[in-house]
């Protein structure tokens, strides 16, 4: 589909003559860039770390406070038939009110937020009057309710935060965007649209994303046109994984080790790789000779086809990786 010149209301991605329209105006594209820049800058601001500190300290304080308040309230209810039980219950409520005050103090000191204090506690004269005032203090009961809600909410927040941190760490430690089913369109879009360039060539080369292993596109304004793709099983990423397996390292884990060994080697096998493993076309496209690879037929990368295997007798067998790595690089 060819878009008319007047159609500028959305981000359009063209894949081999077929156009995929993303409902995004020029203003929305600029807003997306702003969000991306904010997302990159925000983790390094003082406010974020202050909020994290308040969340952790406040949650710990709420957990300890709820445990103490719950324990003393249960004890007070059990002993309520005695005068001593009512005193324990009053102590529990006063403790909940004090913990609420500590939470407000943390909020003011760590986040510089303005929080109004509740009305002060005013006890009636005498011990019995004070006891009655404690048991009828609405602020104390609201503090108990706050602790009962705060603790499970903190557990949920911690679970979500750890999950997001784990995902972020995995993406930072293993920048393999496009692996395991991720669409190449989003890989290209995430590279171009948050960038400061109005026009740029965009290239993604990876193991495999859905069916695509390599994508080339031109980005211009709010348009992204994919003009060339290479599909599975022909993949530079899988070629490097096969080399990783061949040298005895673990696939999807040891590639960085092979890459790190490359500067210490010589390109002794570069011609051998170009003559046998990969057919490099004049336009930059390529095809792998699949008779040397096993990942289409089994659970290993290389083997009986003549490339050689990475295991022998069930044990991992290491080969010198410096020269093969330099040759592939």
Image (spheres, rainbow, N blue to C red):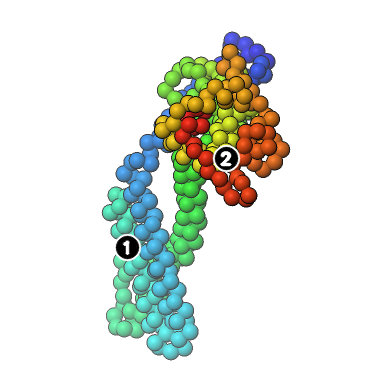
On the image, the x and y values in percent for residue 114 come to 31, 51
Please tell me which residue is depicted at 54% across the width and 17% down the height of the picture.
218
Secondary structure beneath dot 2 equals helix
On the image, the x and y values in percent for residue 298 come to 70, 41
Q: In the depicted view, which residue is nearer to us: 137 or 307?
A: 307
Q: Mark 1, residues whose alpha carbon is within 10 Å: few (<14), some, or many (≥20)?
A: some
Q: In the depicted view, which residue is nearer to us: 145 or 244?
A: 244
Secondary structure beneath dot 1 equals helix
Report which quarter residue 240 is drawn in.
top right
Q: Confirm whether residue 170 shows in the render.
A: yes
Please tell me which residue is depicted at 36% across the width and 50% down the height of the picture.
51
Please tell me which residue is depicted at 28% across the width and 54% down the height of the picture.
109
Q: Quickly name the residue at label 1.
A: 102
Q: Of the residues tagged 1 and 2, which is closer to the observer?
A: 2
Farthest residue, direction bottom: 82
Q: Mark 2, residues whose alpha carbon is within 10 Å: few (<14), some, or many (≥20)?
A: many
Q: Quickly name the residue at label 2.
A: 245
On the image, the x and y values in percent for residue 55 come to 39, 55
- Is residue 50 found left or right of 199 in the rendered image? left
Farthest residue, direction right: 297
Please tell me which residue is depicted at 47% across the width and 16% down the height of the picture.
199
Q: Quadrant of the N terminus?
A: top right
Report which quarter residue 150 is drawn in.
bottom left
Relative height, residue 239 to residue 315 (above, below): above
Relative height, residue 317 to residue 271 (above, below): below
Q: In the depicted view, which residue is nearer to us: 285 or 85?
A: 285
Relative height, residue 71 to residue 54 (above, below): below
Q: Confirm whether residue 29 shows in the render.
A: no
């Amino acid at each position: 589909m060819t878009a008319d010149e007047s159609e500028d209301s959305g981000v359009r991605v063209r894949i081999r003559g077929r156009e995929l329209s993303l409902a995004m105006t020029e203003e929305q594209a600029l807003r997306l860039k702003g969000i991306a820049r904010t997302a990159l800058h925000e983790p390094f601001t003082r406010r974020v770390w202050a909020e994290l500190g308040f969340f952790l300290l406040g949650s710990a304080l709420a957990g300890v406070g709820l445990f103490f308040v719950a324990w003393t309230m249960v004890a007070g209810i059990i002993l309520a038939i005695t005068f001593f039980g009512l005193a324990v219950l009053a102590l529990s409520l006063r403790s909940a009110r004090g913990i609420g005050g500590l939470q407000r103090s943390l909020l003011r000191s760590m986040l510089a937020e303005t929080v109004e204090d509740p009305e002060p506690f005013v006890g009636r004269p005498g011990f019995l009057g004070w006891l009655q005032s404690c048991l009828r203090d609405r602020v104390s009961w609201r503090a108990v309710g706050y602790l009962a809600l705060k603790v499970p909410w903190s557990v949920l927040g911690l679970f979500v935060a750890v999950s997001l941190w784990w995902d972020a760490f995995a993406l930072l430690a293993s920048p393999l965007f496009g692996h395991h089913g991720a669409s190449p369109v989003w890989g290209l879009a995430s590279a171009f649209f948050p960038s400061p360039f109005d026009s740029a060539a965009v290239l993604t080369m990876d193991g495999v994303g859905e069916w695509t292993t390599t994508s080339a596109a031109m980005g211009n304004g709010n348009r992204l046109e994919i003009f060339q793709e290479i599909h599975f099983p022909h993949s530079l990423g899988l070629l490097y994984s096969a080399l990783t397996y061949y040298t005895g390292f673990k696939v999807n884990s040891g590639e960085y080790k092979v890459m790190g060994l490359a500067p210490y080697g010589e390109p002794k096998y570069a011609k051998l790789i170009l003559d046998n493993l990969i057919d490099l076309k004049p336009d930059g496209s390529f095809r792998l000779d699949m008779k040397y690879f096993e990942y289409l037929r089994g659970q290993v990368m290389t083997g009986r086809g003549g490339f050689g295997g990475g295991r022998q007798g069930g044990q991992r067998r290491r080969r010198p990786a410096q020269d093969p790595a330099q040759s592939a690089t």
